[in-house]
Image (spheres, rainbow, N blue to C red):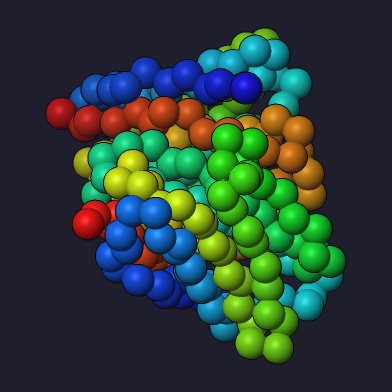
């Protein structure tokens, strides 16, 4: 079965750039979505189709996907961005999620 | 405004069958291109996709759980129902109903319900 691998944790200082990776075999051939989940809340769509931002998601969130790795980048990270982040792709008609990355804003 | 609300038992016993209902408002399940998935999340663990049903009644299941899952919809009630048989303590999780947008590989989980926590224990 297809697997997506994320680092368990990433730390960033306020105002700096945070990068969260998601790795999978030939992931660049698939579309990747990203979701953030704050403690005690439901996940929220942050990026879809590799690079697109839904309305309401700040411009500091961006995505890329090439080769075996997709990356979620948060520029000028704010304390409110502290959350768990999950990548997701489709393998045939099955949705696959990464294991999640806890972003800590120190 | 489209909203989704999950409902079902908070506690089930091992070997029992779980039935969860997702009730939509602001959107008809008979509308073309409407797709709905169920996704679960064990406490402090990652998200896991379970099943999906489309407006035209196409159904898709997680390969690891498909023998235990059934997804259906009642268009007249604007509800999507998920049943999971032979429940086990490892199935303890928050279960989310999610509206999808996009088609096939372009699809993404656009709108999530609040989730309902199901605990499996004797």
x, y percent for residue B97: 51, 62
x, y percent for residue B114: 39, 65
Q: Is residue B39 above or below residue B31?
A: above
Q: Tell me the residue at 70%/88% (across/down).
A: B76
Quadrant location, the C terminus of chain A: top left
In the foreground, B94 or B33: B94
Residue A29 in sight from this viewpoint: yes
Q: Tell me the residue at 29%/31% (across/down).
A: A102
Q: State left or right for residue B90 relative to residue B5.
A: left
x, y percent for residue A47: 56, 41
Q: Tell me the residue at 67%/68% (across/down).
A: B72
In the foreground, A78 or B1: B1
In the foreground, B26 or B71: B71
- Mark count: 0
x, y percent for residue A75: 40, 30
| Residue B7 occupies quadrant | bottom left
């Amino acid at each position: 079965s297809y697997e997506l691998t994320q680092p368990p944790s990433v730390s960033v200082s306020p105002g700096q750039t945070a990068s969260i990776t998601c790795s999978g075999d030939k992931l660049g051939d698939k579309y990747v979505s990203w979701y953030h989940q704050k403690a005690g809340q439901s996940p929220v769509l942050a990026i879809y189709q590799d690079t697109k931002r839904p309305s309401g998601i700040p411009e500091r969130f961006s995505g890329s996907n090439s080769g075996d790795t997709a990356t979620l980048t948060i520029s000028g990270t704010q304390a409110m961005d502290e959350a768990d982040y999950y990548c997701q792709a489709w393998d045939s008609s099955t949705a696959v999620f990464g294991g999640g990355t806890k972003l800590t804003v120190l | 405004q489209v909203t989704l609300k999950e409902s079902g038992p908070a506690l089930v016993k091992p070997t029992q069958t779980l039935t969860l209902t997702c009730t939509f408002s602001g959107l008809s399940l008979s509308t073309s291109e409407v797709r709905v998935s169920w996704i679960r999340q064990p406490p402090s663990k990652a998200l896991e996709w379970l099943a999906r049903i489309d407006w035209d009644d196409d159904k898709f299941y997680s390969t690891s759980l498909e023998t235990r899952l059934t997804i259906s919809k009642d268009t007249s009630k604007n509800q999507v129902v998920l049943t999971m048989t032979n429940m086990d303590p490892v199935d303890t999780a928050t279960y989310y109903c999610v509206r999808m947008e996009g088609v096939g590989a372009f699809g993404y989980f656009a709108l999530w319900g609040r989730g309902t926590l199901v605990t499996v224990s004797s």
